[in-house]
Amino acid sequence: AIGVPDAVRTESIKAFLVLAEDQQPSDALAQEIREFVKTRLARHEYPRDIEFVDSLPTTTTGKIMRRELRERERAKAASGHQTKSG
């Protein structure tokens, strides 16, 4: 998850999820995940946006490269391309 610019909150949380092979991305699944997470995190901590991805960028030691996710989001914003999963 990363922080992304938000007009109302200044910044909001966006989660990137890789689904198990037997799962299909959908708005309903994104909403179900959001509702589940809301019961476990504070209101300001849960992701407002969820994007399903095939893979996450990782370092050679397996750590998620959040910097690359942020750069990807900046490029989308600069091109005017926004993806919303809910």
Image (cartoon, helix red, strand yellow):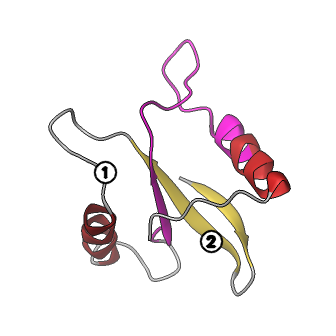
Quarter of the picture holding the C terminus = bottom left
- Magenta highlight range: 46-70
- First in sequence, mark 1 or 2: give its number: 2
Tell which tag, 1 or 2, sits nearer the viewer. Answer: 1
Task: Name the element at disc 2.
Answer: strand
**Can you say whether 69 is above or below 59 in the image?**
below
Pick out the residue farthest to the bottom. Answer: 8
Graded by Cα atoms within 10 Å as few (under 14), some (14 to 19) or many (20 or more), the crowding at tag 2 reads: some
The residue pinned by badge 1 equals 25
Q: Residue at x 52, y 15 (%)?
A: 61
In the image, taking residue 3 as reference, residue 47 lies left or right, namely: left
Q: How many marks?
A: 2
In the image, taking residue 35 as reference, residue 42 lies left or right, namely: right
Q: Amino acid at mark 1?
A: Pro
Task: Name the element at disc 1.
Answer: loop
Q: Residue at x 31, y 51 (%)?
A: 25
Graded by Cα atoms within 10 Å as few (under 14), some (14 to 19) or many (20 or more), the crowding at tag 1 reads: some
CA separation in Å, label 1 and label 2: 21 Å
**Can you say whether 39 is above or below 61 in the image?**
below
Q: Nearer the viewer, residue 48 or 41?
A: 48
Residue 43's label in the rendered image is none
**Can you say whether 22 is above or below 81 in the image?**
above
Q: Amino acid at mark 2?
A: Ser
Residue 12's label in the rendered image is 2
**61 within the magenta span:** yes
Q: Position of residue 50 (x, y in %)?
A: 45, 60
Q: Main secondary structure of the magenta part?
A: loop
